Image (spheres, rainbow, N blue to C red):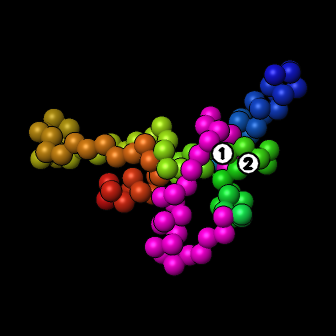
Amino acid sequence: MSKKQIEKEFNLKMASKLQITDIPSSRKKLKFTYLKMLFKENGLSINDETFLENNKLKNEFGEFNIQAELLADENDYSIKVVKFDGNSKASNITIRNEYGYKCLIVAMKKCL
């Protein structure tokens, strides 16, 4: 990367009003099968040609963003749920599950 490109990326990531739709994903190939199924289950129509744009899944440079990564069929994020039998972390653990590495909405539904 040139010095100008590095400065541009740094400024983009450090801006005070930075949003997850601005930050590029480290993943370049993402699929959204689960997200599309959730849309359909809730009565929303999908146009494959405008799906990415309508849901702000790419940044202004045409790269997938962090929002896309979180909503993709596969990602690197998980939700860990632990339930204790008392009121402190010193209590015995009764449930320990990990949900994730998939669409954040699907993971949250399973978690709840």
User: Nearest the camera: 34 or 111?
Assistant: 34
Q: Are marks 1 and 2 in contact (CB under 8 Å)?
A: yes
Q: Residue at x 51, y 57 (%)?
A: 33
Residue 48 is situated, as x and y percent measured from the top left of the image, at 66, 64
Q: Where is the N terminus found, in terms of image quarters?
A: top right
Q: Is residue 109 left or right of residue 47?
A: left
Q: Is residue 14 left or right of residue 61?
A: left
Q: Residue at x 45, y 40 (%)?
A: 77
Rendering quarter of residue 65: top right
Residue 98 is situated, as x and y percent measured from the top left of the image, at 31, 43
Viewer can see residue 28: yes
Rendering quarter of residue 36: bottom right
Which span is picked out in magenta?
Answer: 21-48
Residue 99 is tagged as none
Residue 94 is situated, as x and y percent measured from the top left of the image, at 13, 45
- Relative to 98, is 36 above or below? below
Q: Is residue 83 left or right of residue 62?
A: left
Q: Main secondary structure of the magenta part?
A: loop
Viewer can see residue 23: no
Secondary structure of the residue carrying numbered label 1: loop
- Relative to 35, is 66 above or below? above
Q: Amino acid at mark 1?
A: Asn
User: Nearest the camera: 69 or 28?
Assistant: 28
Tell me if mark 1 has few (under 14), some (14-19) or many (20+) residues whose alpha carbon lies within 10 angstroms of its own: many
Q: Amino acid at mark 2?
A: Asn
Q: Residue at x 46, y 73 (%)?
A: 41
Secondary structure of the residue carrying numbered label 2: loop
Tell me the CA gap for discs 1 and 2. 6 Å
Label 2: which residue? Answer: 59
Q: Residue furthest bottom?
A: 43
